[in-house]
Structures are given as structure tokens and as C-alpha cells.
Image: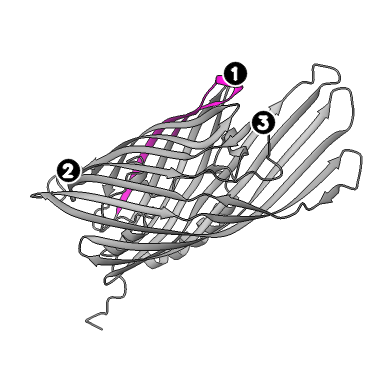
Amino acid sequence: MIKKIIIGACLLISFVSFAQQGTASPYSFYGIGDIKFKGTQEFRSMAGVAVEQDSIHLNIDNPSSYASLIQTTFTVGATFGTSTLKTDVESAKAQRTTFDYLAVGIPIGKFGASFGLVPLSSVGYKILSDNTATEGAVSSQLSGQGGINKVYFGLAYKIKPNWNIGADIQYNFGKITTTSLEAVTGVQNTTQEVNISTLSGVNFDIGTMYEAKLYKKVNLFTSLSYAFKSDLNSDSTREITVSGDPDPYTYAPESQKLKLPSKLTIGVGIGEARKWLVGTTLAFQGEGQLTNYYNSTQNVRYEKYAKYAVGGYYIPNYTSFTSYLSRVTYRAGLKYEKIGLIVNNESINDVGMSLGAGIPIPGYFSNLNIGVEFGKRGTVSSNLVQENYVNFSVGFSFNDKWFVKSKFN
């Protein structure tokens, strides 16, 4: 049954991932857009804290985790988000529904493998400057859509019962389209500029996870992963159309190589397996070279990315037969991110809180994971935009045994 679910979901979500507009943030204009959270709903509800060698939940943030799986795991997730965008004089609301991930993890003895489809970044904005009341003034509308997806394959090995290592190879691909429309009040003709960039590249991640006993049932969990620097090839075209002119002007700028920086993620936590966990995750990333020819502006520069998060979970009684709520996993987390972008000399930061629950599916070794995330990104200072967002996420984690030879015909 799980195999049929995987095939159907892969076909559907592969199509949806190309068509979706996964953000409504004006900051997605810069670089390659909003960088998406890399992880499943279980760990997103803990602000990204993923330090335990989990045997039934797939951790796609650290490839070494695959060696801890005890059953084939299929996981898929999506988010409905609403945000209020405000400046110091006005505000607007936006909504979007996005595909978050689709992944499969397979245990193979001391090895573990995983493959899947995960969005890397998303572009989605519409900015209007209306000066039609002033004769000779320029009014403009800027919009953008698209983003980058990644398909990955990873392999992990359990060196010892408490020590894993692993690596991922990822292929990044996508398209970003931006449109600029300008009109001068009192002049009949308008000018439209459309830029289309096709992006692709390969990158690698490595990771390790280690677990040690501290006291009786209390363990220490550690996680370390590293994403190597990589190139992102950008092939672009630009088309300029003036109303009344039937022949648009089209040309292709030279191909560019954008630079994705390396990233180091460190996690540590303490807890009792299938009972409780408290942990923290620190992530650091270098400055990227992500400016394309169509979004180069003088008021923007890039800085080093950093993330600080704390989170954990609690399960009242994992094996309870009398209370269903006692088997539910309750999760929470807090995060602070410097997203690596400086606009008008202001660092753009993201502060958020998340809550969630893992709900067992009766009769199956699987669960439904739900969560809500509240946060604030940006500032109204220096003529910028502040985003107050609420994201409602849902994920399914299905577990089943594969490659087991039947004893009966």
C-alpha cells in the first residue's frame, strides 16, 4: 500500500512543485529568493532542532540519520501561510499554500538510504508604485515568481550502535521569472521587461550523529553536518516590449555562476528516547554571491547567515493502551535567524516560535504531524517592510517493511 501512495504522491507533487508560488515576501526579490526550511514537519515544530537518531522519522537535514531507520519511511508535507506586510505608513495581507518536501528513507542493514524532492528557494512578490496622479511621473509594477528545487540521494552507515556517518548528493534546478511594467503619466506607451533565468547545479552534504548515555535512561545527542560550497549556473533571457511596437527586443546576457556558500550546522541535546528531549541547533553560513544581472541594486549587500534555535518534545506515555492523548508527541521551539541579507544598511532578521503535535495513526506504525509557526521578519525602519507571518503545516510519515521475503504463499 505504501508503495502505491509513494508513486501517486511523487507524480502529483513533482508537478505542483514546478507551479507553486511558495512565498509572498518582497525580500524574495534578492538573490535566489527565500531560502526554504530544509526539514520535515516533525523538526520544524521544534524550530529545526534535529539531534536525535530517530528510528521512525526521516531527518533530511543530516544525511547520517538514515542509518537509524528501522522501517521504510515515506514522508510528505505542505504549508498554508498567511502574512501581514507593513511599512511605517500602510499594510497588506498575503496568503499562499506550498509543497514542502517529499522523501523516502530505506534501512539496509547497517546502511540507510534516502531520496526525495525538496524546495531550495522560492520567489513570489508583487510591488506597485502608483504615481498616476502626477503628470510626467513614472508608475511601475514589479513581480516575480518561481524558485529552485532540489532532488537528492543520500547514503548513511552505522559505524557503531550509537554513531552514524552519511552523505548526500543534490541536484538543484529551477526557473525564476521577473516582470517590470513602467508607464509615464500622460504618455500613452508603456514598457514591459521580462527576465527569465534558468538555474542548475550540484552540491554535497556530509554529516555525523553520535549518542552517549549520561545517566540511567538519559542520553546525550549530538549532530554535525556540513554543506560544501557550490556553483549555481544561471542562463538568462531578457525581453523588452513597448506598447504599440509589434516586435519585442530580446537578448540573452552571458551565463553567470552564482555561488552558494558552505554551511555548518551543530546540534546538541539531552533526553530520554520516546519520552522527552531538549536541544539546541546552531547554523552558520558564509556570504553568498547570489546577485543575478536583473536584481543587482546598490542598496543591497549580503552577509554571513546565522541561526540559533532551541526546541524539544514530550510524550506522556508512548506505550499507553488506555489514553490516546498520552501517545501524542508534543513539540515546541524558538528560533532567531540572520538571513544573510542587508537592505538599506539594515540586517534582515527572522524571529519565530513554533508549536506542533505528532498524532499516531491507529493500526499503523505511522503518524500525522501538525504545527503552527508565528514569526516576524524584517523591519519598518529605513523604508523597509516588516512581515508578520503565521504558517500552518501538516506532514504525514508512513512506515512499512520492504524487502521482507514472505514465509507463506
User: 146 and 268: which one is in front?
Assistant: 268
- Residue occupying the far left of the picture: 216
- Which numbered circle lies on residue 326? 2
Disc 1 marks which residue? Answer: 90
First reached walking from the N terminus: tag 3 or tag 2: 3
Magenta residue span: 367-390
Nearest to the eye among marks 3 and 2: give it.
Answer: 3
Relative height, residue 120 to residue 380 (above, below):
below
Quick check: marks 1 and 3 in contact, CB under 8 Å?
A: no
Task: Find residue 328 and report its image quarter.
Answer: top left
Measured from the top left, where is residue 392 in percent x and y? Answer: 41, 38
Residue 262 place in picture, x, y as percent: 48, 51
Q: Main secondary structure of the magenta part?
A: strand
The quarter holding residue 116 reads bottom left
- Numbered disc total: 3
Q: Which residue is mark 3?
A: 127
Residue 371 colored in magenta in the image = yes
The kind of residue tagged 2 is Ser
